[in-house]
Amino acid sequence: MTDSQQDTFDSRAAYQLAIDRVLSAAKKELCIFDSNIGDLEFDSRARANALAGFLSGGQDHRLRVILHDLDHLTRYSPRLMALLKRYSHSFSVHQTPESLRGLSDRFFLADGVSGVIRFHADHYRGKVLLDQPLEIHGWLKRFEDLWLESVPGATATHLGL
């Protein structure tokens, strides 16, 4: 495997492998834009442990998530909610305003250099980019714009009732 890579995927299994590749490459910052976080399977034991390891790696580690719908996170993701409580200084969740909930692409970015891009939420088709800062730059800019447009969502004390 070369240091810099771009591959495509077109199945759920390949998408899950792409998530694992980017998550394992993350050093300081993860930025996620998704509809409800369910497809990312971050509440599985393995992924929750990987996120905990990432978040415990230093005070400068950040996980920022933007979701259209917080229900899956708050009602069906106890491991993620526990991480949100434990690492509230490093883990933030925002929700898109109603006007942006029609956006259908999804992306998961690491350190501004790697990412998994799904072209449409209804299909497991997209690309994984490793050590591709020029390609990731536009996606990171889009994330920052969405972050500014969105509002704080789930917090460590959010009960999801």
Image: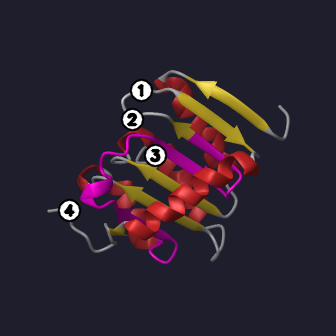
> Where is 39 relative to 59, above or below?
above
Reading the image, the residue beneath label 4 is 160
The one nearer the camera, 105 or 58, is 105
Image-quadrant location for residue 151: bottom left
For marks 4 and 1, the one nearer the N-term is: 1
Q: Amino acid at mark 2?
A: Ala
Q: Amino acid at mark 1?
A: His
Reading the image, the residue beneath label 3 is 45
Q: Are marks 1 and 2 in contact (CB under 8 Å)?
A: yes
The number of numbered discs placed on residues in the rendered structure image is 4
**Which dot, 2 or 4, sits closer to the camera?**
2
Q: Amino acid at mark 4?
A: Gly
Q: Which label was assigned to residue 121?
A: 2
Residue at 38 percent across and 40 percent down: it is: 104
The image quadrant where one finds the N terminus is top right
Q: How much space separates mark 3 and mark 1, taking CA atoms? A: 25 Å
Reading the image, the residue beneath label 1 is 123
Q: Are marks 4 and 1 in contact (CB under 8 Å)?
A: no
Q: How much space separates mark 3 and mark 2, taking CA atoms? A: 24 Å
Q: How much space separates mark 1 and mark 2, taking CA atoms? A: 6 Å
Residue at 70 percent across and 49 percent down: it is: 25
